[in-house]
Image (spheres, rainbow, N blue to C red):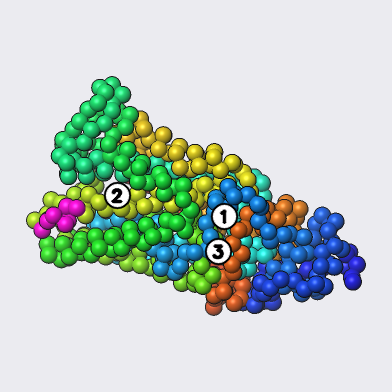
Amino acid sequence: MKDKNNIKLDITSLIGGGGGEEGESSSSSSSSSNNNSVNSSISTIDTIKIGSHRDIKGDELFNLLEISRVPREDDIFVKEFGLKSIGTIGGICLLIGNITGPGMVNISYEFQQGGWILTTLGYILMLTLSSLAGLFIIESMSTIPGNSRFQLRVEFTMICRFYFGKWGYILSQFFINASLQITNIASIIICSQVMDSIIIFIFKKTCGVSFSEGWVCVSHENANTSPFSGTMFFTIGYLSIIAVIVPLGFMNLNDNIKIQTACVIIMFIIVTSWLIIFILLGLDASNLPPIGSINGISQILGNSMFNYAFITTVPSWVNESKPNVNLKKSIWVSSSISTCIFILIGVFGGLAFSNMSSTSDILSLINASSKSNIFSKFSVYFFPFIVLASSIPVFSIIVRYNLTQNRLMHPRYANFIAILLPWIIVIPFQTGDWLNKISNYSSLFFNSVANFIIPFALYLKSIQFKHRNHISNDQKLILQELSFETIDWAENDFIQTHFKSLTHVPKKYSKRIAQISLIILSITIPIVIITNFYFNN
C-alpha cells in the first residue's frame, strides 16, 4: 500500500471529466476492496491533494473521504425531499409552466411597441441565454465529486456553498429565495383577485371581511384590480386559493408533476383558442411595424428576461428526474416551445388588434372582441389562475428545499417561511396594486441575479475547481452532508460521459461563452432595470 503522503488524486477523474476538454466516461460503480485500505490510510488527512498520477473513478471519492451512502434514519427528514420519479414529459411540462406565465398577456403589446424584428430577436437571445444558464448550472452540479451522474441531492444554494463558500452561500440563499418568494407574493395577489372575479362571473357576487367595514359583498368586477375597494382581511377568492394551493406546497416537487402537466395542457388549449380568434378577427400587417418606438425598444430585454426566469427550478428538477431523462434535450425543448408560444401570441395578437394601449392586454381585448364567446370568456378568467396558481406551490417547494438542505432550518420553520409567510404578507394588500408594482421591480432585480448571474458565475467557479490542487475541509463536510441527505441514489443512465453543456464545443470556448454571457448580462441588467423604471413612470 502506498504511503498516504504519496497518494494523489486525478481531479478530472474524481468529477467524472477525466482526460481532456471533451470529457471522458465516468464510472458510478463502488470501489474495490483495495480502496478500503486507502480509506484507512487517508482518514486523518485534513485536505486531500489532487494531482494527475492516480486514476480514481468518479464515485470512489466517497470511499476516499470515508463518506457513507446511508441516509439518516429520520422519517421526517426523508419526507423533506422527493424521489427520482419525474419523467421526460413531466419535466418538460414543469419547465414550460415556469417559463410561460403572466407576461404572456402583454406580449402582443410588446411586439407592437418594439417592432416584430427586434422583439423576436430579443426573445431568441433570452431563449439562448436562459438555456445556457440552465445547462451550465447542471454541469456545475455534475462537477461536484461523486455527482457525475447526478447521484447526490444537491439544491441550488448548496451548489453555491460548494463553489462560493460561506458568504456566497448566504448571499445566494437571499437572492434565490427572495426571487421565488417575491414572485409568489405577486402571484398570490393576482390569483386572489382573479378568483374573486371568477366567483362574480359564476355566482354574480363575492364577499369578504374588511378591516373597516366588516362583512361586505360586491357584485361588480374591476378590470385592473380586486373587485373590493377597501382593505380586506380576507375574501372568498383568497380563501378559495388557499384551500387549493397551500396543501400542494407541503408536498414534494415530484408529487406536483401531474398538476403541472394538466395545467400546461390547459394552457396549450387556451393559447390555441386565442390564435383562432386572432385569425377570425383578421390579420392586418399595418398593425405590427418591423421596428417600433424608442420606448418599446428599450423595454424588449426587460420584458423578455422576465418570462425566462425558470433557472432557479432546474437543480430541484434534476434531483428528482428519472435516471433515463435527457436533461439537455429537455432544457432546449422546453425553452424552444415556450419561445414559439411567445412569438405566436406576440405576432398574431399584434396583427389582430390595432393601437394597443399600455393598459390593454390580450385577455381584455379578446373579451371585448366581436368573436368573443363563452369559451373565450372562460379562458380569459381562468388563464391567469392556471399559469400563476400552478407555479406558486412549485416555488414554495424549492424555497423549502433550499432552507432545509444542510439542516439550515428545521422543516417546521422552513415550511412556515416557504409556504405560509407569503400568504400572510399579502393580507393587507389584496385589493391594491402598488405592492404588485413594487414586487415587479424587485422581482426583476432578484430574478435577473438568481436566474442569470449566479448560474454563469457558478459554471466559471466549477471550471476553476477542476484546476485546483485540493478539496477543502469545508467541501469535504459538504459532500458528507449531501451523502446523508441523498435518499435516492439512482444514477442518470442516459449520461455515459461527464455531462457537458455544449457537446461539440471545446471546453475553453464554453468558458469564453460563459464569460461573455456574464459580461453582457452584468451590463444589460442594470440598464433593463433603469429603463423599465424610467419609462413606466
Residue farthest to the top, as pictured: 212
Relative placement, left or right, of 388 versus 416 is left
Instruction: Tell which of 255 and 278 is nearer to you.
Output: 255
Look at discs 3 and 2 and give the one toward the viewer: 2
Residue 420: where, in percent of width, then height?
44, 39
Q: CA distance from mark 3 to mark 1?
A: 11 Å
Instruction: Tell which of 491 and 51 is nearer to you.
Output: 491
Can you tell which mark lies on residue 385? Answer: 2
Q: CA distance from mark 3 to mark 2?
A: 31 Å
Residue 485: where, in percent of width, then height?
63, 54
Q: Residue at x 29, y 49 (%)?
A: 385
From the image, tell me which residue sits under label 1. 155
Q: Is residue 376 magenta?
A: yes
Q: Which residues are magenta?
A: 371-378
Mark 2 or mark 1: whose residue is earlier in sequence: 1
Residue 58: where, in percent of width, then height?
69, 70
Query: Which residue type does callout 2 highlight?
Result: Phe
Relative placement, left or right, of 31 versus 174 is right
